[in-house]
Amino acid sequence: MAANAAPQTAVMQSSTNYSFPQHRLRRTQNDPIKTPLVLVACGSFSPITYLHLRMFEMAADFAKFNTNFEILGGFLSPVGDAYKKAGLATAQHRLRMCELATDLTSTWLSVDPWEAMQSEYIPTAQVLDHFQYEINEVLGGVKNPDGTNKPIKVMLLAGADLIQTMSTPDVWSDEDLDHILGGFGTFIVERTGTDIDDAVSNLQKYKDNIYVIQQLIHNDVSSTKIRLFLRREMSIQYLIPAPVIEYINLHGLYGDDGASSMNSMRGKEVTSGSASLAVGASGSKS
Ligand SMILES: Nc1ncnc2c1ncn2[C@@H]1O[C@H](COP(=O)(O)OP(=O)(O)OP(=O)(O)O)[C@@H](O)[C@H]1O
Ligand SMILES: NC(=O)c1ccc[n+]([C@@H]2O[C@H](COP(=O)(O)O)[C@@H](O)[C@H]2O)c1
């Protein structure tokens, strides 16, 4: 196998045999009075970091102590290759890394390959529609104690930088924003470098559907910084899960010639001068 070739992930062997990963989705509630909820994080995950995983735990704590939601599952949906963002390893690699990161560390997080398997770019609104369909139309939501079914609410889990882009012209269509924030709703994790009040100031009409989560222990790790460390042959130990580090090393990802991100990062390094770790300060993309 070529150094950079990814083994087929369990769920990506054929686009025709896709099945929704439902094994970790709870189908009954502990407290049927609460609103059942599934969180979906969309992103590049190139590579997945501990913060991506922590976002779900922060959201779970927030939901438990501040809302009437009961979280029944969490899904990572890596973007497909058509997104063509700098620094994007192939979808197969990113999916596999997400699987490695969640399989052994979590009992309630899953990775859905559907978005990553598509040859065209799928806007986030359609990704959420896909989850809505699989969870509520196909599986039928949760079972109530009396045997009837109840739909599970699907919401987007995102960092503040992503929500800030929702006020940037031409990044999101008005229809999609309405669909995502008006229809589904979102949990937003604050992020160093992004003013959360500013990020949501233009989204006030959706405020009842937007839940802002403070990071009580600030973690500013980003995939961009991990890629930078790798290129500099610096340690990424304890920043991302160990099996993901092993996988990156095994497949030679994000090295000098391996990652498409690195050309675009060079410019950033020069301008950031000796403050090298400022490269990729939260929200900055490469
Ligand atoms: N340190 C962080 N704090 C808060 N949210 C984060 C953090 N890192 C990632 N996220 C969120 O995780 C989701 C997935 O993001 P993505 O895969 O683009 O990660 P990233 O680390 O920002 O990537 P990159 O550095 O390649 O741009 C997004 O909603 C993003 O806002
Ligand atoms: N219009 C849209 O649906 C839209 C716009 C920008 C980003 N996104 C999504 O946000 C996620 C993160 O994007 P970035 O890695 O570019 O921050 C990706 O999953 C991407 O698909 C969606």
Image (cartoon, rainbow, N blue to C red):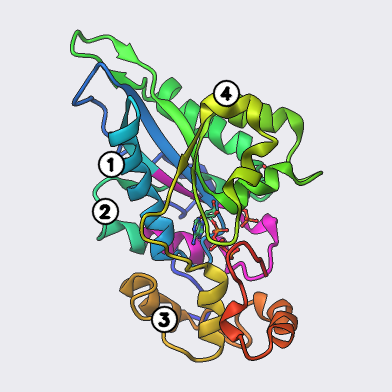
Image vertical order of residue 29 relative to residue 131, above or below: above
Q: Nearer the viewer, mark 3 or mark 1?
A: 3
Region of the chain picked out in magenta, as a range: 75-99
Distance in Å between CA atoms under marks 3 and 1: 29 Å
The label shown at residue 236 is 3
Q: Nearer the viewer, mark 2 or mark 4?
A: 4
User: Which sits earlier in the primary sequence, circle 4 or circle 3?
Assistant: 4
Residue 108, given in percent of the width and then of the height, sits at: 28, 45
Residues at discs 3 and 1 in contact (Cβ within 8 Å): no
Q: Secondary structure at mark 4?
A: helix
Residue 175, given in percent of the width and then of the height, sits at: 73, 28
- Nearer the observer, 218 or 2: 218
The structure residue drawn at horizontal position 33% and vertical position 57%, both measured from the top left corner, is 102
Q: Which residue is mark 2?
A: 106
Q: Quadrant of the C terminus?
A: bottom right
Q: Residues within 10 Å of mark 2 (few under 14, many from 20)?
A: few
Tell me the quarter of the picture where residue 28 sits: top left
Q: Amino acid at mark 4?
A: Gly
Distance in Å between CA atoms under marks 2 and 4: 28 Å
The label shown at residue 24 is 1
User: Which sits earlier in the primary sequence, circle 2 or circle 4?
Assistant: 2
The structure residue drawn at horizontal position 47% and vertical position 54%, both measured from the top left corner, is 12
Image vertical order of residue 260 relative to residue 84, above or below: below
Q: Nearer the viewer, mark 1 or mark 4?
A: 4
Q: Is residue 183 visible?
A: yes
Q: Which residue is mark 4?
A: 183
Q: Is residue 212 magenta?
A: no
